[in-house]
Image (tube, helix red, strand yellow):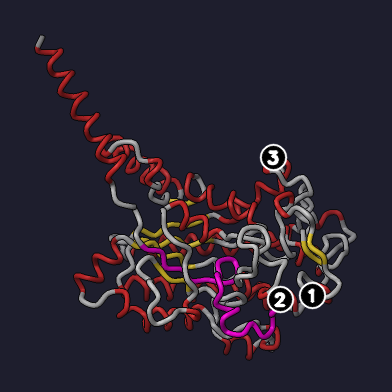
């Protein structure tokens, strides 16, 4: 009888906890703040005038979901949009388009299409300035954040509370530092830029932590050797230059080097700031799946050929890129992983976002959205175990 009563108490207790947590738990994140480039820009370049890339203000950009151009470099939503959706938050408003009375309680986006990790001075000295879409580098975006911060929180207590429930994304950033060098045909500069890019990213994270950041997600670089841009610019007759998926080995090697160095730098940063949760988002591995088995993800038109472009083996043409005269968008972007030769489709971004949130491509893992939290006791145990196990694997 005593055992029976104990079981009833246990069942009642855990059943009660599950009910309370499932229906009344607050969101794991109340705010998202984002820094980066065109992979996550929700309208900043467009708001700045988009002088060198005006086509993002017109269809077919935005045609799939928004049914209009929003300044996003895709046919629809981006990874940052899907992350916001997963945590029940609104899409991030672009900083440069904010109005005085706009609600920014749930976050702001500082990312700018074409942005670099390194400042303009680096590209001037390298003779690459004419290729820049924008001068709004990571450091400039950080300046915007510091300027806006008093509108987000004021006192230390207020800011501690604010950042405790905030997810801050730093990137992807650095891809354009390599892209500009590649477009200029300066491969030596591309290789030499990596340590400088990594240093700039780490310095920005350090500053954000000093400003109060406690949860940061830092994405690595995509496999650029699978990009229609690189496949077109550096097309080769030598089969040995390509891997089994048709991607350029050498350029994927540059991405792998960047990601390896970034992970090492993040590990050192974790030791320096043990009270801060610094997560690495493996964009490379999450996207590589599309090139290995495109049909498994619904990309029946393949993963290497762009949906929107001006022809050629990979439907990418620098003189007739997506949105320009001579280009044309495919009828169904969801059958393509690549949108315009540089950026991915909404369908591809959806899979990547899901892979980051559900695992295993962010580590330590992101906090699970409310829908996946079953009970306080069980989730807490599982979450801590998974966090430590995955984290220790990559130390």
C-alpha distance separating marks 2 and 1 = 7 Å
Residue under label 1: 324
Instruction: State left or right for residue 323 relative to residue 63.
Output: right
In the rendered image, the vertical position of residue 207 relative to residue 313, given as above or below: below
Instruction: State left or right for residue 321 relative to residue 393.
Output: right
- For the N terminus, which image quadrant? top left
Pointer 2 with pointer 1, Cβ within 8 A:
yes
Q: Is residue 199 visible?
A: no
Question: Looking at the image, which residue is at 53% across and 48% down?
Answer: 354
**For residue 168, which quarter of the picture?**
bottom left
**For residue 30, which quarter of the picture?**
bottom left
Mark 3 residue element: helix
C-alpha distance separating marks 2 and 3 = 32 Å
Pointer 3 with pointer 1, Cβ within 8 A:
no
Kindly give the residue lying farthest to the right in the view shown.
237
Residue under label 3: 296
Image location of residue 42, percent across then percent down: 55, 70
Mark 1 residue element: loop
Magenta stretch: give its range.
31-55
Instruction: State left or right for residue 288 relative to residue 145.
Output: right
């Amino acid at each position: 009888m005593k055992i029976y009563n104990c079981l009833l108490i246990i069942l009642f207790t855990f059943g009660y906890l599950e009910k309370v947590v499932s229906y009344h738990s607050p969101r794991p994140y109340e705010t998202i703040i984002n820094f980066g480039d065109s992979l996550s820009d929700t309208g900043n370049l467009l708001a700045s005038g988009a002088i060198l890339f005006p086509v993002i203000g017109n269809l077919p950009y935005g045609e799939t979901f928004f049914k209009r151009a929003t300044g996003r470099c895709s046919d629809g939503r981006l990874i940052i949009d899907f992350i916001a959706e997963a945590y029940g938050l609104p899409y991030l408003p672009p900083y440069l388009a904010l109005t005085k009375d706009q609600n920014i309680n749930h976050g702001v986006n500082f990312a700018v299409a074409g942005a670099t990790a390194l400042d303009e001075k680096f590209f001037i000295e390298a003779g690459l300035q004419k290729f820049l879409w924008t001068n709004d580098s990571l450091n400039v975006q950080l300046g915007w954040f510091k300027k806006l911060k008093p509108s987000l929180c004021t006192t230390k207590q207020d800011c501690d509370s604010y950042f405790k429930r905030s997810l801050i994304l730093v990137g992807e950033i650095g891809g354009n530092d390599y892209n500009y060098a590649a477009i200029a045909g300066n491969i030596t500069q591309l290789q030499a830029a990596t340590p400088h890019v990594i240093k700039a990213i780490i310095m920005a994270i350090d500053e954000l932590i000093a400003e109060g950041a406690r949860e940061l997600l830092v994405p690595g670089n995509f496999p650029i050797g699978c990009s229609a841009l690189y496949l077109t610019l550096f097309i080769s007759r030598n089969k040995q230059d390509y891997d089994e998926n048709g991607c350029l080995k050498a350029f994927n090697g540059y991405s792998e080097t960047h990601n390896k160095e970034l992970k090492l730098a993040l590990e050192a940063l974790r030791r320096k700031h043990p009270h801060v949760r610094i997560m690495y988002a493996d964009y490379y591995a999450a996207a590589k799946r599309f090139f290995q088995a495109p049909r498994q993800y619904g990309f029946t038109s393949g993963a290497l050929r762009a949906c929107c472009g001006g022809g050629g083996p990979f439907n990418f043409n620098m003189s007739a890129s997506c949105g320009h005269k001579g280009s044309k968008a495919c009828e169904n972007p969801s059958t393509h992983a690549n949108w315009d030769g540089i950026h991915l489709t909404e369908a591809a971004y959806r899979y990547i976002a899901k892979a980051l949130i559900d695992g295993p491509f962010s580590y330590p893992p992101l906090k699970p959205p409310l829908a996946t939290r079953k009970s306080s006791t069980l989730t807490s145990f599982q979450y801590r175990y998974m966090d430590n196990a995955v984290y220790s694997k990559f130390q």
